[in-house]
Image (tube, rainbow, N blue to C red):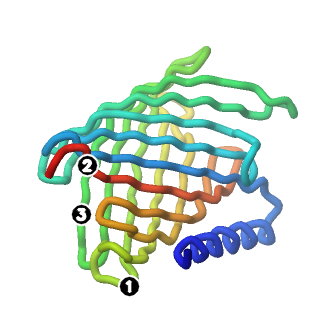
Amino acid sequence: MKILKSLALIIFTLGATKSFAQKSDLGAWYMYFGNNKISKKLNFHNEIQYRNFDGIGDLEQLLIRTGIGYDLTENNNNVLLGYGFILSQPYVNGEKKENIEHRIFQQYITKQKFGRFYLQHRYRLEERFLQDDFRMRFRYMLGLNIPINNKEMLPKTFYASAYNEIFLHLNSPTFDRNRVYGALGYVISKNLRIEAGYMNQIQENKNRGQIQIGFYNNIPFNKN
């Protein structure tokens, strides 16, 4: 309960700070990420993101992703082929519309550790099948986790988390968006952790903040 109260306090503080800083339609993203071993080399990626225009109730986007990954080296240098289903409900001239996108993506993730610093690089290529268009996009994310009360990311460890991700179209205009994120997380067990934080998304004509709560499940399906 102390952990949940701490995370709730962080969310409230971030939201209040952003609201006082500028007038903005602050959104909220609730996210589940599964990365589960199905053999020594193979992993099953599964992900659900429920994105709201406000705190809860006004759906902006529902994103479901899944895929199969392969470790080129032990627990690192992972290549993955995946599929995503995206339901979007944007406001157009004050009226809510509905768009569906099917997405195929390929990605490569490599991890590094320097002392207490856990780094992750993710390179992702997306083929986006929209209702009346086809687009391709490249994404690069640099992520960082730093344990606070332990030297390693062990159970019962609080940690700071941050990332920057840039999105680039393979056609004009090249720049799509950039996301900057900061959070506090808690390692529940060897394969479970939770994060709560704030992400600012910068687009060509828009700058919007999102409160984010993420749950990460790495429980293996295979017997170790």
Q: Residue 149, labelled with which disc?
A: 1
Q: Is residue 174 above or below residue 132?
A: below
Residue placed at 38% from the left, 47% from the top? 34
| Circle 3 SS class | strand
Amino acid at pointer 1: Asn
Picture coordinates of residue 165 (x, y %)?
Answer: 47, 52
Question: Which of the two marks, 3 or 1, is nearer to us in this view?
Answer: 1
Image coordinates for residue 151, horizontal then vertical, percent: 29, 82
Please give the name of the residue rendered at 42% of the width and 38% of the height, measured from the top-left corner: 138
Query: Which quadrant of the figure has residue 97?
Result: top right
In the displayed structure, 52 sits above or below 106; it is below
Q: Which residue is mark 3?
A: 112
> Residue 85: where, in percent of width, then height?
51, 28
Q: Amino acid at mark 2?
A: Pro
Task: Please tell me how crowded label 3 is: few (under 14), some (14-19), or many (20+) other residues with Cα within 10 Å.
Answer: few
What is the secondary structure assignment of the residue under circle 2?
loop
* Image spot of residue 213 (x, y percent): 56, 58
- What distance separates the C-alpha of mark 3 from that of mark 1? 20 Å
Q: Are marks 1 and 2 in contact (CB under 8 Å)?
A: no
Q: Earlier in the sequence, mark 1 or mark 2?
A: 1
Residue type at numbered disc 3: Gln
Asked whether, in this view, residue 34 is left or right of residue 79, the answer is right
Identify the residue under disc 2.
220
Q: Considering only order in the chain, which callout, 1 or 3, is on the residue closer to the N terminus?
A: 3
Which of these two is toward me, 204 or 160?
160
Q: Nearer the viewer, mark 1 or mark 2?
A: 2
Q: Relative to 120, is 98 above or below? A: above
Q: Is residue 142 left or right of residue 110?
A: right
